[in-house]
Amino acid sequence: MCGIVGLLLKAPSLRPRLGEFMVPMLVGMTERGPDSAGMAVFSESLAEGRRKLSLYCAEPGFDWPRLERALLEFLGDASFETKANHCIVTTRAEEVKVRSWLAREYPPVHVLSVGRSIDLYKDLGLPSEVANRYGFARMGGTHLVGHTRMATESAVTPENAHPYTAGEDWCLVHNGSLANPGSLRRKLEKLGERFESDCDTEGACRYLHWRLSSGDDLETALEHAFRDFDGFFTFLMGTRDRLALVRDPFACKPAVVAETDEYVAIASEFRSLAHLPGIKHASVFEPKPAEVYAWSVQ
Amino acid sequence: MVSAMKEAGRRVEFDLGRQAVRDLNQFLHGDLRGVTEVAVANPDGAHNIAVGLNAPVRVDIDGHAGYYAAGMNKEATVVVHGNAGPGLGENMMSGRVEVSGFASGGAGASAHGGLLVIRGDAGLRCGISLKGGDIVVGGDVGSFSAFMAQAGRMVVCGNAGDGLGDSLYEAVIYVRGEIRSLGADARIEPMTDEDIAAVGELLAAAQIDHPPEEFKRIASARSLYHWNADANQTY
């Protein structure tokens, strides 16, 4: 079991309060996912040519200032924002340059996300603990994807927490389980996709990213996924300007959507939406199985 | 708990914004001392609201309920003025459960008796393994509804999804709209006078207005009742 939450703010005036609305959504899904929690938050894009990398290191007391100095010296252009075990690096450097330097100099440091718009945090602990550790409530932005995890098929580790990412400004969270992640992985590794964990969800994330970057639109990519994924899923996906939601054809895992003129909010259960402003007058519906729902930032 | 309850004659109010579901349910399971109506405010999607009732009390839930609302109901009338999560009224024995909006998956599963009224749409597996209860759905039902339903009646005023009535026993389904596909051994049969009367009676009980003649009857062809050695895994 896991919990998923998503929020897209249509009203620009609310965007500084994105995290404030989101934390009770995430905490509301604690019973569905007490092991670990994570959030991808999308805010206004950096200018073309610049990108952000969300880094993570599980070692307590990791010396981030030392990494920052060394990376700045190596890249010549970088700024840093460190929160607990995470650090967001903003730079004009190519992703591969940063990744290869980290692999050489700091093997325990993982790259959680890359893009012009996405920041990503995920860690072990109750959703409320993770939210406090990284100050989720103070974060602003246009939209976000969040997850609370109750592990069923791979270990409780930070890298197995959600969201998962692939490529730039793309992330996915999953409630459910896949029975064929191994065969998906073998197929994708032959095609050049590189895996970083042993969680079934990473297979789904990289599969969809592979289809999308091969030219499929989201609907076509998901048509293929319905055939190639053996298992249960509600997926919530985030891109630079969109949230998208899909449930498997058997609708084994729940989801509910509430929409007003000011926001679109998605959660596994209504109890994560009950605190939102204007919820009593929101249009509340249950997404149908095997149908793709998507909302864009205006 | 008692201090937070406002007793007005035989009516009691609970506010789940301040009180626990367990307090509400323990009150409903106890000696009601003449209380006939219980109003529940701020349900906010909580699970297990008004489960296991066993007395002729009316419970009005003002808002959306979470999983398993009014499960195992006996004698009581439980009305959700909002939407309901998975497992609404499952294993009902008698009484009445009603939701004004939609009900998620597995509504009325295994109900032995009573009437479940869903004014909006029902999700997947509505009335799965129905054992004698009646279900009236004002909107559509999702796929695999009435799977292995053994006894009871289901009236669907809208459309039905895939695999309706798969491996049906003696329950009967009435559908007014389109059926995306029937499950194994389910078939459409002619409406008899008894069927028209039954649909009319159930619609009247649910206070939903449609001419009963517009419904189709779906029942079991009973070809799965006996093992057919020649079928060779075709079903």
Image: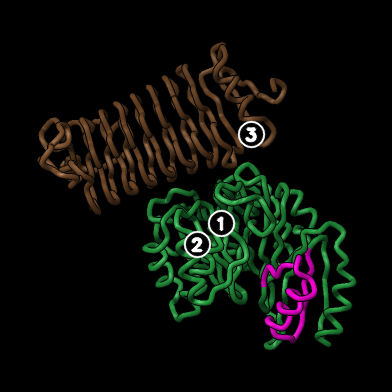
Chain colours: A green, B brown
Q: Where residue A252 sits in the image (x, y, percent)? A: 44, 48
Q: Secondary structure at mark 2?
A: strand
Q: Secondary structure at mark 3?
A: loop
**Disc 2 and disc 3 on one polypeptide chain:** no
* Position of residue B113 in the picture relative to residue A125 (left or right): left
Q: Which residues are magenta?
A: A86-113
The picture quadrant where one finds residue B157 is top left
Amino acid of disc 2: Leu
The picture quadrant where one finds residue A202 is bottom right
Mark 3 residue crowding within 10 angstroms, few (<14) / some (14–19) / many (20+): some
- Residue at image coords 54%, 59%: A201
User: Which residue, given by chain and number where applicable, does mark 2 sit on?
Assistant: A245
Chain to which the residue tagged by mark 1 belongs: A
Asked whether A125 or B64 is in front, the reply is A125
Q: Where residue A109 sits in the image (x, y, percent)? A: 76, 67
User: Which residue, given by chain and number where applicable, does mark 1 sit on?
Assistant: A266
Mark 1 residue crowding within 10 angstroms, few (<14) / some (14–19) / many (20+): many
Query: Whole-Å distance between the Cαs marked 2 and 3?
Result: 30 Å
Q: Where residue A171 sits in the image (x, y, percent)? A: 59, 67
Query: Whole-Å distance between the Cαs marked 1 and 2?
Result: 9 Å
Q: Is residue A102 magenta?
A: yes
Q: Earlier in the sequence, mark 1 or mark 2?
A: 2
Amino acid of disc 3: Leu
User: Which residue, given by chain and number where applicable, does mark 3 sit on?
Assistant: B16
The answer to whether the residue labelled 1 contacts the one labelled 2, judged by CB atoms less than 8 Å apart, is yes
- Residue at image coords 62%, 74%: A169
Give the number of the mark in front: 1 or 2.
2
- Residue A298 higher or lower than B222, as above or below: below
